């Protein structure tokens, strides 16, 4: 069941629901012809802030201000007696802003929650979508070693920028070796 509550600081203008929907309430407005009309109540569209979170711009006294939707939901529906500063998405889906999916937490808990550490370690050390394998060659062209990435070379005594420059044909050798990206 969907429950609606006023948004703190925007009482009488907007409401948020327990399912994470936001609506602008009915209010009087000046029509283009100069008369008085009524703006009907409507569900508002939200937008992605490019980091996976949904945001909305609310207006009060004709002054716009951006807000993250999950914060509006949590402030309206979830008690925060310990005055915790962050909100965790329990199922780790940032656009799922239902009350049952949100909880107040501290920064440490939020950073270490769920699969975050595992996802970061995969992206740093074995993410074939964002890294290119590097082949280390002798000056005569014999394969010495295959590396996960230029950054992996950098963690093992080579300069990753020099390795990348060799792979991009900007430099011939680095530390007595030739380098090239592995063919895909």
Image (cartoon, rainbow, N blue to C red):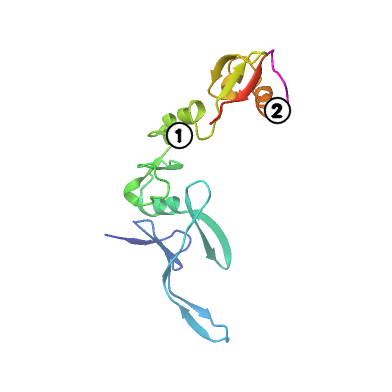
Residue furthest out toward the right: 171
Residue toward you, 118 or 165? 165
Q: Decide which of 5, 18 is in the foreground and name it.
A: 18
| Residue 33 shown left or right of residue 9 in the figure | right
> Which residue appears at 56% of the width and 58% of the height?
65
Q: Position of residue 155 (x, y in %)?
A: 58, 18
Residue 143 higher or lower than 111, as above or below: above
Q: Secondary structure at mark 1?
A: helix
Q: Could you tell me residue 19's position as x and y percent?
A: 34, 56
Q: Is residue 63 magenta?
A: no
Residue 3 vertical placement versus 96 (above, below): below
Q: Which residue is mark 2?
A: 169
Q: Is residue 152 left or right of residue 100?
A: right
* Mark 1 neighbour class, 10 Å CA radius: few under 14, some 14 to 19, many 20 or more: few
**Nearer the N terminus, badge 2 or badge 1?**
1
Residue 47 vs residue 41, the one in the foreground: 47
Depicted 20 relative to depicted 38: above or below: above
Instruction: Say which residue appears at 46% left-offset and 42% top-offset.
Output: 85
For the magenta stretch, what is the residue range? 171-176
Q: Which residue is mark 1?
A: 111
């Amino acid at each position: 069941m969907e429950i609606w509550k006023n948004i703190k600081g925007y009482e009488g203008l907007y409401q948020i629901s327990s399912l994470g929907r936001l609506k602008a309430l009915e209010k009087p407005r000046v029509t283009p012809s100069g008369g008085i009309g009524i703006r009907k109540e409507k569900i508002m569209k939200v937008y992605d802030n490019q980091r996976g979170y949904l945001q909305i711009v609310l207006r009060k006294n004709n002054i716009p201000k951006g807000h993250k939707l999950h914060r509006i939901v949590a402030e309206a529906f979830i008690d925060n007696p310990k005055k915790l500063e962050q909100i965790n998405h329990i199922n780790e889906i940032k656009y799922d802003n239902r009350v049952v999916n949100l909880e107040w937490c501290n920064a440490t808990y939020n950073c270490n929650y769920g699969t975050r550490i595992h996802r970061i370690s995969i992206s740093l050390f074995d993410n074939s979508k964002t890294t290119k394998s590097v082949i280390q060659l002798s000056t005569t062209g014999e394969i010495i070693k295959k590396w996960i990435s230029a950054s992996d070379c950098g963690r093992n005594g080579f300069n990753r920028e020099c390795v990348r420059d060799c792979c991009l044909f900007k430099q011939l050798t680095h530390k007595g070796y030739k380098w090239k990206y592995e063919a895909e």
